[in-house]
Image (cartoon, helix red, strand yellow):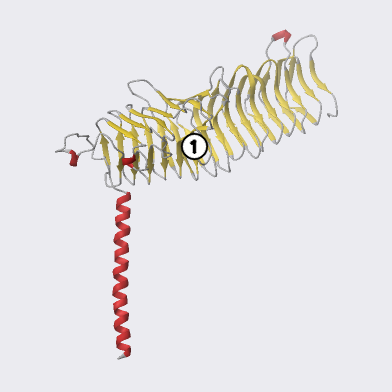
Amino acid sequence: MVMRRVLKHHVCLCVLSTAIVAGLALITSQKVYAQLKTENCMGLVQDSQVLARHHDKREGKIVCDSGIKTRTLTGVRTIDMSDPNEGDDEAIKIIGPNTDITIGDDPLTVTDSKSSDKSAIRVEQGARLTLKEKVSITNVKKVMEVDGSGSVITVNGGTFGLKNAIEAGKDGGRVMIEVKKGGKVVFDKRGQSNGGDLTISGGEGAMTTVTGIEVSETGGEVEVRKGTTLDFTGVTEAIKIKSSAEATVSGGGTINVTGSGGGSTVVKMEGSGKADVMNLTINGSRGATVTGAEVSSGTLMMNMVKLMQVTTGAKVTGSGTLKVLEGTITGKDGADTGVSAGGEKVTLNTVEISQFMTGVEATKGQLVINGTSTITVTDGGTGLNITGGSATMMGGEITGTGGARSRSTGVYAGGEKVTLNTVNVSGVQTGVEVTNGKLVINGTSTITVEGMYAYGVKVSGSAS
């Protein structure tokens, strides 16, 4: 009898437990459904009260989930991210997988009249979003975020900008566009009615560091397609790769950077990641301080990249590694330095460097220059300035300017060891000057100097 009662109680408890689990499952499913609820993603805007249930509102945030598949959202739309009736989410959220949304054939305006820290746009879980010419996202603290493998934002046009005098966020600095966990952002202005330029504005008078595009966590892709010019204004860093991210920046297009008050860097590497920058033209701006690439850690490879009108072409420090293949680095008005090698290793293969006071300088680590690389410096400048580490140049040319009155130096060797193998030095007052370490010249190297006080090879100090 006792056993029976225990058994009955046991059965009752089982039934009760099953009911509780079922209830929790229902609550959980309802919560997930609430998170993924579609808003203003029917396609058409309709102000009529009669038709409003089956159409989108003119004002209000947009949420499209995986049940939508492919859709173009039309009609004039306005979203204020600070509207208390809209909650604290992104203005536009596209959730995958297999969701493919197009916006911007009609005007879409997103602003933030107060101080929301959320991104204006978020695309995640393999969703895709295309933004057309009539999209305007301004006066916000973050423009867009693309998260997850297969997630893509394609920008065909539009206006994008942060608030003026923006202050640092909770993690320091501000990021306009964030790409992470395998996401991708594509800039493609080809065939658009108002030309091939797109502008990403960091606003005026920023009180903190402003990054145009940040690739983080496991990495992602940035593509600027051929025929498209992407203009960055008011940014401290145009593109930053951080943490352990693996990034690809490519596409055949052009990136223009107008320096901020304290100077700007086009591509910046931080952390232990790896980045490939390929087939791009990158322009600095006259009168502004612009560094083409900066690597403090991690590995950056630049392949068929043109760096034009920059103050410093590339700067490597700390544990950073840089490899440049078939590239062009051009300064402006006798600018500072083509490549500054102060990291772990710098390799330049078939690279053309010109219009700098110093072509390549090395203060630490290993420098290797090979292929048909050429270095041309302004009058009074130095082609190779080696004050630390070791340097090897195999093939190629170092040329000064100024003719018979040239004051330039081909190579200054003050590091551990400098090797020149089949290198032609010409148009300089001093071919090679050695003050420290070991100099090796071999192969069919030639040195041609200019002027009455010229030296082919000048040795002093403890050099050998």
> Which residue lies most toward the left here?
50
Neighbours of disc 1 within 10 Å: few (<14), some (14-19), many (20+) = many
Left-right relation of 110 to 328: left
For label 1, the SS is: strand
Q: Where 253 sits versus 319, above or below?
A: above
Near-viewer residue (112 or 200): 112
Q: Amino acid at mark 1?
A: Glu
Q: Where 37 sits versus 175, above or below?
A: below
* Residue 364 horizontal/vertical position (percent): 71, 34
Q: Where 298 sits versus 227, above or below?
A: below
Near-viewer residue (441 or 405): 405
> Which residue lies most toward the bottom here?
1
Q: Residue at x 77, y 33 (%)?
A: 416
Near-viewer residue (194 or 352): 194
Near-viewer residue (432 or 345): 345
**What residue would you read off at disc 1?**
214
* Residue 410 horizontal/vertical position (percent): 72, 20
Left-right relation of 225 to 191: right
* Residue 324 horizontal/vertical position (percent): 59, 31
For the C terminus, the image quarter is top right
In which quadrant of the rendered view does residue 126 lie?
Answer: top left
Left-right relation of 425 to 458: left
